[in-house]
Image: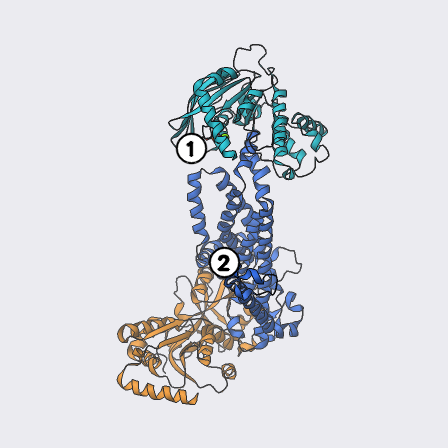
Amino acid sequence: MEPIENQKSGGNPQKTVAPGGIENPQAPVLALEEVSVTAQGKSILNRVSLDVQPGEVFGILGPSGAGKSTLLRTINRLVDLQPDFRVRGRILYRGEDILHRRVDTDALRVRIGMVFQQPSVFPVSIAENVLFGVRRVKGVRRSERAEVVERALREAHLWGELKDRLKDSAWNLSTGQQQRLCLARALALDPEMLLMDEPTSALDARSTEAIEDLILGMRERRTVLLVTHNLEQARRVTDRIACVCVRDGAGEILEQGCCDAVFGNPACRRLFERMEDLETWADL
Amino acid sequence: MGFRKLGLLVSGVMLAGTVSPALVGEVLRVQGSTTVNPVVTEALEFLREERGIRYRIDTLGGSAGGIRAVGTGAAEVGMSSKAIGDEDRRRHPGFDFHETVIAVDAVALVVGPDVWGAGVRSLSREQVQVIYERPGVSWTEFGGPDRRVVFFNKEPGRGTWSVFAEWSYGDPGEAPPVSHPEVGANEEVRTKVSRTRGALSQLSASWVDGRTVFALGIVNDSGETIRPEGEALANGHYPLSRPLLLVTEGEPEGAARELIEFLLGPEGQRLVRKHGYLSLAEAGL
Amino acid sequence: MTRALAIEKERPSLAGTWSFTHDPWTTLVWGSLILSGGLFLFAGATLVWQSLPIWRHEGWGFLFGGEWFYRHELFGAGAMLYGSVAVAAIAVLLAVPLGVLAAVFLSEYLPRRLRWGMKVLVEALASVPSVVYGLFGVLVLREWVGGAVEPFGGWTGDTLLTAGLLLAVMALPLTVTLSDDALRGVAQEQRVAVRGLGLTRGETVLLVVLPQAWPAVVGATLLGLGRALGETIAVFLVVGRMDNQLPEKWFSLEMIFQPGQTLTSKLGGPETHLAAGDPLHWGAMMGLCLMLVAITVSCLGGARYLQGKGRGRA
Ligand SMILES: Nc1ncnc2c1ncn2[C@@H]1O[C@H](COP(=O)(O)OP(=O)(O)OP(=O)(O)O)[C@@H](O)[C@H]1O
Ligand SMILES: [Mg+2]
């Protein structure tokens, strides 16, 4: 495997190891060891440890404010952009500690893509949005552009809807389409791992279904970390989940494992029931 | 109108007997020449402390501005470095301008250290006309360094400029239509002349310090060089000199009168000398 | 509260006559609108009215004529128009790239705490009175320019270039803080989204932040330009105030290395006082005022338009 430091400057960011860690299914692709995050001295995540297997869909559940988004941003080092955030512990990605100072974070983010809670498309055309990252990071020949756009849009279940509007501004799309466009944008970079932060929380039922299909389609090819509020969604698409709770103001892992095990844990069940209650209340 | 004026006069006379005019609350407004301004400001400051006169002074528009301010009633006292001309009287027909000479000023042609250092000491009227009419002429024509004469023309409306134009062309209106960079206040002239190579400009002699700017002598028609110093100033031999005067409407009254009497007295004349102008006694007036 | 009451009171008559007098707020708003509009129109009309003699005397030649000798009744504002445009152009060409670069540095690279301090400093610089800048111009800038223009045929430090440089220095703080505001106005989510794709900070600035902030930055520039054109004292001290410096060819650069005159330096000079009482000369000065107002107002209008456009997109 290529060291991450050289990813971008090396000019060949293609993966050298097949995704999914077929060689050794037992070795986690991502391992968090006692990761703590503080913001302005205030603890947000406390000693979080996780193992994510290659090619699985790993769900993260927990109440609002538990630090789920922060956890994802720590994994691709987007926390670096937030002033006064401190991260301690180790995050091993394919055996390499990505919290190390010398890690090329831009190259890391190419390999670990992210989709945010709120879609934010760029004020350019739909095709340009898809190509936005990939043409700069990997370089796309003019003749290949159409193909890259089509492949990414197909994977994001958008091709049928948008194939005739590729030159239109992306700002006129519906929220659901914008979210899937963000996904296509991330997929165009062909990331090994995808961090998805409540990708369906702002969407209607049909868009949600499209995105869930998409996640299931990616399984085995990419590792997915999916933050969700929705227990049903977790049951439908994830292989294993971790339950995050808040203790003394900071997020902690209460339990992790396969869905049934976590849902069977009485403490987790109480937590989930409270979350569902809250959501029902919020819906009213 | 007539009645109101009469009423004011009567009450003024009645008050004058009992209260000093300063206590009536009138503010004495003084406006005009930057050349006269330092003397008058110091005199007014003295009068404020000693006799409680209230005043406001500014140099908007130079001499012309001061004369106009008196003519329009915007000020009680105008400061001017030139006598009231026909043009002023034409602008304010029937107005009773009253002039009081308080000192005499001389306009020097000044150069910076480089030109002075190169040995230029004097210019004749003809040479000055050449400089005025041929922008870009070199100092070599006047015994100076091989460098363009940078003539900073004192802006129109300033007493200094009128003195210069009257001497070189007989009348400001006769000055030929040539454009030069212009300068205004005396500080500006001194700064720019001392800091521009090849500079020449007109400046009140009292502002010449012989350190940053140097006064040239004037070669008169009979070939003698007259410097703006000592005897030549006192006897009016130096051609570019002018009276400094205060302008009022009719005989000065009240605070204006106090100011003028103070300036004509021994203390006022000491102030005049202190600011580098010729006292009336020195000028033989 | 008053508003609600007023609406209620008005409700019955809504279908019928237009009776804004019943609503004190509407009356107030309309009243002040009419008043300020009226004042503006009155000022404009006065300028036009008082400048009539010069238009009758010179016609359109007044705008572009190259000769101004008031004692000979020659009034051509061409050299001053040229001077103003040249000075403003120099100022903008320098202040905008520098200002935007500084703003990018402030907004995108500086740590938050330092950024706050710098911002205060820059805004303090923006509020320094122009006389101070004028003195800086006379004592430092004209000296420096005086030496620099000699190879280009210059012979004094009082030049259009000096005035342009000084205005650039004066406009810089405003350009920096307004551009910084414009850059800050770009949603943080956009930046995070770009970084999430593995693009660098520089790419984020070039590809997303600047393009989105651009209309507002241009608006800020025009605002600065409007100020630059209206600025008097500082320009007055270093521009040289030399009349009739119109280049033979409009786009030749030789004249910027020489003393010149701008609309403001002329209006700030003694001729404004000298002209009083002479309808033609006064008319000429009012004509200069009218030109200055027209140019400044169109700059400000352009700025508002572009800023509005920027907001519409965001
Ligand atoms: N910039 C910041 N400075 C300080 N505290 C922050 C900052 N950003 C987030 N936090 C805090 O960190 C905690 C975790 O936030 P985070 O957004 O990770 O929660 P979350 O689990 O994603 O919640 P949600 O389900 O609502 O998205 C919250 O208590 C939040 O207030
Ligand atoms: Mg979140």
Location of residue B277 (image quadrant): bottom left
Instruction: Determine if the C-beta at disc 1 is less than 8 A from ligand 1.
Output: yes
Residue farthest along the front direction in this orientation: C12
Q: B79 and C313: which one is in front?
A: C313
- Left or right: where B141 falls relative to B43: right
Residue type at numbered disc 1:
Asp
Closest to the observer, B154 or C241: C241
Residue at numbered disc 2: C3
Chain identifier, colour cyan: A
- Looking at the picture, how far across and down is residue B211, in whole percent? 39, 62
* Hue used for the chain lettered B: orange
Q: Which quarter of the figure is the N terminus of chain A placed in? A: top right
Label 1 chain ID: A
Q: Which residue is mark 1?
A: A84
Q: Position of residue C257 (x, y in %)?
A: 57, 56
> Secondary structure beneath disc 2?
helix
Q: Amino acid at mark 2?
A: Arg
